[in-house]
Amino acid sequence: MSIIKHFLADPKLLLNAVGEGIYGFDLSGNAVFVNPAAERMTGWQSDELLGKKIHQYHHHSHADGSDYPADECNIYKTMFDGKTRQVTNEVFWRKDGSCFPVEYTSTPIFKDQQIIGAVAIFRDVSQQHKTENALREALNKVQVLTEQLKDENAYLLETLNENWQDSGLVGSSAIFQAMLAQLELVSQTDSTVLVLGENGTGKELVARNLHRLSERSSQPFVKVNCAAFSPTLIESELFGHEKGAFTGANEKRKGRFELADKGTIFLDEIGELPLEAQSKLLRVLQEREFERVGGSKSIQVDIRIVAATNRDLWKMVEEGGFRMDLYYRLNVFPIRVPALRERIEDIPVLANNLIVQLNKKLGKQLRGISKKAIHALQRYDWPGNIRELQNVLEREAILSKGRLLDLSQALNATEQHKSEDGELTLAQAEAEHILRVLEISNWKIAGSNGAADKLGLPESTLRSKMKKLKIAKLS
């Protein structure tokens, strides 16, 4: 009998094998199922809980010891209203009287369109809380040191920019500097990192710098694009295969995990990983071992996992497209890479950094980019983020005949800043007029001979228009 037939014949085999704790309840709130993982985490054995109300055993109090009435319990509420709940800020009490923080999901069970009970799936997040607290303390220490060294801030910022210059991660905006601080802190650990962000924001760059800053920097950095392989090939790519494992497997081949041993493996576009491969990936994350396709020998690896996606993984979990247990294994330390529209003030330094790279790539000798071009770049929303900025600058570098880069073409195919007959829109014409007056006024806004006075506008109105039109003085 195949393993699938075993699971179909006795679903409890599967429930007993998972690493998360699982409880089943009837409508009276009595336990009807307790899996081994729940026993290990709480210290309560199933024969002590079955047929009894679990709430009074280890959900009776909040973390501070205050009473937690059963009618306020989120698990019990699910049995009454049939709504699924995800809870992240509660504790369960062990048999020995200690407690531990949990994240759990309570889901109703229906039969013939009637609620007959509920199931609660939970996990111990103690280690995650410890990591978060340690990182928070470290960030606080950094803040204290920054305040103490206020007189040296200019030198420190210059040094920081020099340190990151070759990495490609440049920018001084608060949101970007906060991301760099997270990156530096977690790079000194072996914790699994989930890099989140839109397409083109530089998620792979973040992953490569995590590896560069880590103690594994001298070991391999192996990238896997999970969207680049068909479901039938992805397992072979990840775990390798033995000779004759399938048609075309003419020789033994190592997979990406084996190649990344002692180093870092970067699982790009992890949200595209087929469900069949997700279960095998979960085993590697849990046990750091796997078998090649067609093989029976377990291969152990010592690797650091970095994954990236532009998708909402939790939404995929709710829709059944991504395993919940794999999501929790990957989401140990999430780093969000900000979109370019969230860090518009970084465009000048980003543009100059990209121009340096383009000079090498194209054999150009560009000295920089014009202020007018920078203003235009900062008024654009950048749906393609830094990748789109790079493409725009490369196109202009190819077309440029001078030493200073300017914009000769519209920023997108639809020429969003122009009307159909090619004329400037009212907003763009207003922005360019305000910009000219500001430059004539040496960016003096208020007072006699200020831009507001020349334009015949109140100072507050001019500042409001500048914000709306994304007009800012370049440093």
Image: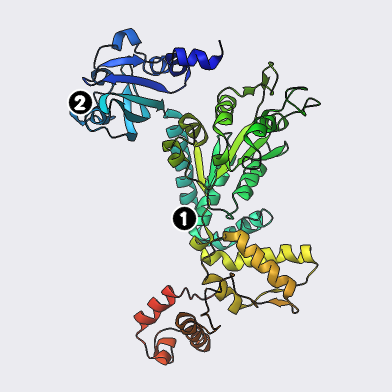
Residue type at the position of mark 2: Ala
Within the image, what quadrant is residue 87 found in?
top left
- Depth order, front residue of 76/354: 76
In what element is the residue under mark 1? helix
Residue type at the position of mark 1: Glu
Whether 289 is drawn above or below 49: the answer is below
Going from the N terminus, do you reach mark 1 or mark 2 first?
2
Q: Position of residue 290 (x, y in %)?
A: 64, 22
The structure residue drawn at horizontal position 29% and vertical position 12%, both measured from the top left corner, is: 49
Within the image, what quadrant is residue 370 found in?
bottom right
Q: Position of residue 134 (x, y in %)?
A: 47, 37
Number of numbered markers: 2
Whether 372 is drawn above or below 322: the answer is below
- Judged left or right of residue 107, residue 206 is right
Whether 151 is drawn above or below 91: the answer is below
Let me know if residue 292 appears in the view: yes
The residues bearing labels 1 and 2 have C-alpha atoms spaced at a distance of: 48 Å
On the rendered image, what quadrant is the C terminus found in?
A: bottom right
Q: Which residue is under mark 2? A: 70
Disc number at residue 147?
1
Whether 397 is drawn above or below 419: the answer is above
- Depth order, front residue of 134/196: 196
- Judged left or right of residue 60, residue 1 is right
